[in-house]
Image: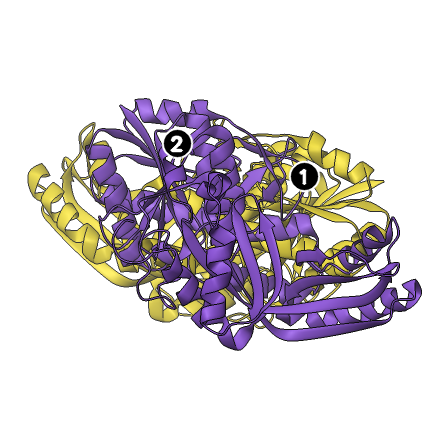
Chain colours: A purple, B yellow
Amino acid sequence: MGILVQKFGGTSVATADLVRRAAARAIRAREAGNHVAVVVSARGDTTDDLLALAGEITDRPDPRELDQLISTGEQISIALVAMAIHTQGCGAISFTGGQVGLLTEPVHTKARIQRVNAKRIHDEFAKGNIVIVAGFQGVDANQNVTTLGRGGSDTTAVALAAALGADVCEIYTDVAGVFSADPRIVPTARKMDEIAYDEMLEMASLGAGVMHSRAVEFGKKYHIPIHVRSSLTDEPGTMIVEEVNRMEAITVRGAALVKDLAKVTICGVPDKPGVAARIFHEIASANIVVDDIIQNTSREGTTDLSFTVAAAELRAIMDTARRIASDLGARETIADDQVSKVSVVGIGMRSHTGVAERMFKALADAGVNIQMISTSEIKISCIIDRASGEKALRVVHDAFGLGGQTP
Amino acid sequence: MGILVQKFGGTSVATADLVRRAAARAIRAREAGNHVAVVVSARGDTTDDLLALAGEITDRPDPRELDQLISTGEQISIALVAMAIHTQGCGAISFTGGQVGLLTEPVHTKARIQRVNAKRIHDEFAKGNIVIVAGFQGVDANQNVTTLGRGGSDTTAVALAAALGADVCEIYTDVAGVFSADPRIVPTARKMDEIAYDEMLEMASLGAGVMHSRAVEFGKKYHIPIHVRSSLTDEPGTMIVEEVNRMEAITVRGAALVKDLAKVTICGVPDKPGVAARIFHEIASANIVVDDIIQNTSREGTTDLSFTVAAAELRAIMDTARRIASDLGARETIADDQVSKVSVVGIGMRSHTGVAERMFKALADAGVNIQMISTSEIKISCIIDRASGEKALRVVHDAFGLGGQTP
């Protein structure tokens, strides 16, 4: 028999009806001849409600107790899904992270998975049961409840698939799959049949949500095919898979837009070792996540150092940036909170030339000025004026023929 | 250092303010030089809310999954209490039943405790922490969550006190202690300073709520003094303790009234072996709990067999009773759903005569007719007309001088 892991997010189990639908889907997979493990998140607003209870007691809850508290959200979900499967005449048993031996490092609110005890699940498979596992949570070696942080339930699902030797990990969501660009902005965007892990990782970090990077990294590491698909239909979605040779025939797989960014430039920074390290150490100490960092060649012993952050973080970062600039004797610090980032991604770029040129020309033809450029092996990103963001995404998407039918 | 277990019920942690008060009380006990373990129930309506979620899925939830679901209620409480203790500057750590090694038999919704792993708690005591434990729940040997049924959190508290070798188990509640009669009915009722386990067991089964019998039995078995006291004041409440000789000087400790009973009499039952067994087997099969059973001497080969049940159960029981009566060739089945039971309890009865006489005389003087009588070693109960119930409780209470100052 095949082994299948299905993951349902909080919106997919938010009501009794949706719980029944998720249950029915798991049963169909079981009846098609698979052993099925189901990973579930906390329902709808449950986590927010639990956080509000903690907020009535303290603004700074102890992380261990916070995990103890919010992990009840998934525990509620798994019991309800198991009950719903029972009412539809099929065997099912639910497990918390602790019960299923999902061991993590002893860290709270953002623990990493160390090990999953697959035996308990295989034992239940052997009895013919569907196994329901709480997402997002585990325990450390002392049975303290830990949680995995953002994207945690996806990570649970992929880790479980790896531990069970599953054929595929299905991620049910409210979109039909991974698109060549956000269909709300680019009407011609096409749902991809497949995408390589590395491409998905770049897409995820460039704002094409759907799945959290951690889960994709886990899938890549353990070679688990991940099927991102809609919980509302039976249509196949997008398979996230190993890179194969034929994928390189497609130079660009998708385009993405990060809308609300701010750009900070520290001008006239002394060009000597350790300066960049100092700047970004201080910014990290202020708990601000920097997006891209760009430094160009220096002139006359100084250089301009730019970086982007989420627009909402700009106010918080400017004090730090100005203080550092003053300490370093930099000339000035300028900021622009009206920028966006448009990017193209594709492993085919490695073996094809002319991708950058084609992207820059498409932007130029549309009258979009490029303020900054950064590239990796499989993506090219341009910082542009926010007002041009959506137009830029559309023209870049079209320039690479990503729309309509499979290219 | 002393060791203290404090138990707070759902109403005592229902709001953030109450959680803070419970936390403050635990800290005061800690600062008075005790190691403190706190047992907490699910908050206010949490359990009902969780049951309603299950009710949206199925009318007959699987017991294992029901336990998995409702055990989240106490888990929420313990995390919040731990957080509240932290905010007041004291160390605390919360444990679910599973985390603290509260092992039960593998039965759901009404499991019995088999073992408590005290080491984990002693380790936390050694670090100076207050330990918060989820009431009402445990795990079986396979880490399946189990719950203890009615009165479960009291039982957890007393079991924990036994495992830890605690000096006392404090049960915080919304009344000041155990009274010689219900003060809402008998204004002169007196709060008792102490009561023997056996007396408390009889009082509990006779409707003087406060504590569930199971927890009292546990306390008796493991010799744990139980202090029932108010969560609203610092006044001492009632100590439930071992029986000591001086207690026998008091013939009657308290009086109690069970208001809403129904009396069923099967008249003219053949007086032969196995008849009573058959009757109560069938009633038990119908899941009806019988209160008292009374059978008097037979005349002319037949006897009358009476029993009492909760008035609300009468309709359900009459079909069964009539069918059995007909099968047995009994003469008729009569019922009265307008009766109450008034009782007096005291271990001193064992060594004193005249208790029954004094009780019957008090009722007679008040014009209350006694319909049925049943006795045990330390209690006497009379079934009377419900309209006379409260008056009967008052006159009996006064007849034994239970009111006002310590007799």
Q: What element does badge 1 sit on?
A: helix
Q: What element does badge 2 sit on?
A: helix
Q: Residues within 10 Å of mark 1 (few under 14, many from 20)?
A: many
Is A10 left or right of A292, judged from the image as shown?
Answer: left
Query: Residue at 10% across / 44% down in the picture?
Result: B323
Q: Amino acid at mark 2?
A: Asn
In the displayed structure, A75 sits above or below B84; it is above
The answer to whether the residues at label 2 and label 1 have Cβ atoms under 8 Å apart is no
| Callout 2: chain | A
Is B231 left or right of A133, judged from the image as shown?
Answer: right
Image position, residue A248 (x, y; %): 41, 38
Kindly identify which residue carries mark 1: B161
| Number of the label disc, if any, that sits on residue A275 | none
Q: Residues within 10 Å of mark 2 (few under 14, many from 20)?
A: few
Image position, residue A186 (x, y; %): 36, 66
Please name whichever residue, B122 or A329, is drawn nearer the observer in this view of the structure.
A329
CA gap, disc 2 to disc 1? 67 Å
Query: Residue at 73% across / 58% down in the picture?
Result: A287
Please name whichever residue, B407 or A159, is drawn nearer the observer in this view of the structure.
A159
In the displayed structure, B229 sits above or below B293; it is below
Image position, residue A134 (x, y; %): 45, 43
- Residue A284 at least partly seen: yes
Quarter in which the C terminus of chain B is drawn: bottom right
Query: Residue at 51% across / 36% down in the picture?
Result: A218
| Callout 1: chain | B
Image position, residue A378 (x, y; %): 52, 45
Q: Amino acid at mark 1?
A: Ala
- Residue B208 at least partly seen: no
Please name whichever residue, B177 or A98, is drawn nearer the observer in this view of the structure.
A98
Please name whichever residue, B288 or B197, is drawn nearer the observer in this view of the structure.
B288
| Number of the label disc, if any, that sits on residue A245 | 2
Query: Residue at 26% across / 55% down in the picture?
Result: A232
